[in-house]
Amino acid sequence: MSATGPSHLQGHALALVTVSLALGNFMEVLDTTIANVAVPHIAGDLGVSPTQATWVITSYAVANAVSVLLSGWLAQRFGQVRVFVSAVLLFTLASLLCGLAPTFGFLLMCRVLQGSVSGLMVPLSQTLLLSSYPPKRQGVALAIWGMTIVIAPVLGPILGGWITDHYTWPWIFYINVPVGVAVALSTRHLLSHRETPTRRVPVDTVGLALIVVWVGALQIMLDKGNELDWFDSSIIDALAIAAALGFALFLVWELYEKNPIVDLRLFKLRNFRAGTVAVGLGFGVFFGNVVLLPLWLQTQMGYTSTWAGLAVAPYGVLAFLLSPAVGKNLNRVDPRWFATAAFVIFAAASFWRAGYTPAADFVSIALPQLLQGAGIALYFAPLMAIALGGLDPQRMAFASGLTNFFRTTAGAFGASLITTLWQRREALHRTQLVDHLSPYSLPANEALTHLQQSTDLTGQQALAQMNGALTHQTTLLAATDLFWISGWLFLVLIASVWLATRPAGGAPVGAH
């Protein structure tokens, strides 16, 4: 905050604001994954195919990505507190309507509304949280906020699967209602006296339209690319062209527009540029692994969605325990060293996972996740401190929106890319090994004979069982390939951290 602004919060008020804003952010991020496991149930109840039902996820993601970029302009026009509280209330209403949806079309409209306002909640919760803390303690705020970003997507499938199995799918939306009402009321009560100045600025309608075109096309391309075999599909080709042209026109327009809806000039700032790139690319690799591991566990290791989520979840332990300590020391330790340590830990966890075998048990799968939690604690807060350091509150809303947009888009791209590469690496390993499963191969003949004699299976049944074992092995080989690649990418990304300078005076954010 500026010297003339209201004083920073203290004591119980600060604690309540922290809980309220973190809970609001957690609720929004949770909804990005909680519906994933409910897609088959939604499809059956509303009479659509499972493929069509995935638009429940895609429509939310597209609307979210667009609105993240609008958060800065809306906060400038109407005030940060007012926009955040309104977004939470609309999100709560949309959640209720999603649960009550009588048709699939109505559900999609409600998900678009939910996604449109949820994109405002993420950057504004971050901005309001930071402005409530004095500069020397803003690292703690960033650490708490960062934990919600990482832990919520993991808990989403676990909670969504449990609710769907024990109740019905509408309850994955109903649970937002009491939480949303509590967050909106408490935030308004605690922060209404800290509303930011507003000013009338023209609506950049052309910039808004271009955002909708290129972000929407890119997000749909990423979501549907693997399903439609990427650029072998004319639909994906058309979406790629629309995204590229829309993005090019958007850049030109926003750079020369007097009142742009997105402040691209922020990228002229060295630390914002370096911090945003490191956050985005690092999260892309990280989130790709977050998607790959439970997918492998469920499809090849016989894990249910709940147990797969539990195997992934241990990274929340050290993230929760270490984040406050990291936050407290951000003003004393160069955040670039924290971020470097984070990438080293991420790489070590990835290399550890690359050693998985078909006999890997729950403990051996969970231990690398536990280690990765230490990296998470050292990752988000320091990099966000680098990216947002020294910005005034008004500009911080734009900067936070841009950084979160880049992180979200990179995460979607990472998830799509790693699932595609997994399938293609599996096909490569299958091609290399399948000859050994031929009935004319001596080792295969011996294995088939032994299997038939010990199980009374027919020749075709024994061959099918061996083929299943082959698939089990090739998918593991493909996954370990990607874990190795991820480890090396994390090490390469260390260089991006050192393109930034240490925030002046050691203050993580808002020192000006």
Image (cartoon, helix red, strand yellow):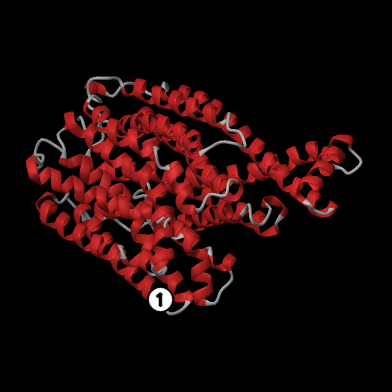
Residue 102 percent across, percent down from the top left = 43, 80
Q: Residue furthest bottom?
A: 102
Query: Which residue is more in the foreground, 482 or 229?
Result: 482
Q: Is residue 488 above or below residue 153?
A: above
> Going 28% across and 36% down the picture, which residue do you hit?
143
> Going 38% across and 26% down the picture, which residue do you hit?
339
Q: Is residue 287 visible?
A: yes
Query: Which residue is more in the foreground, 329 or 211?
Result: 329
Res 397 → quadrant? top left
Question: Relative to residue 386, is residue 169 drawn left or right?
Answer: right
Query: Which residue is more in the foreground, 264 or 470?
Result: 470
Q: Amino acid at mark 1?
A: Ala
Question: Relative to residue 440, is residue 477 drawn left or right?
Answer: left
Residue highlighted by disc 1: 101
Res 179 → quadrant? bottom left
Q: Is residue 384 visible?
A: no
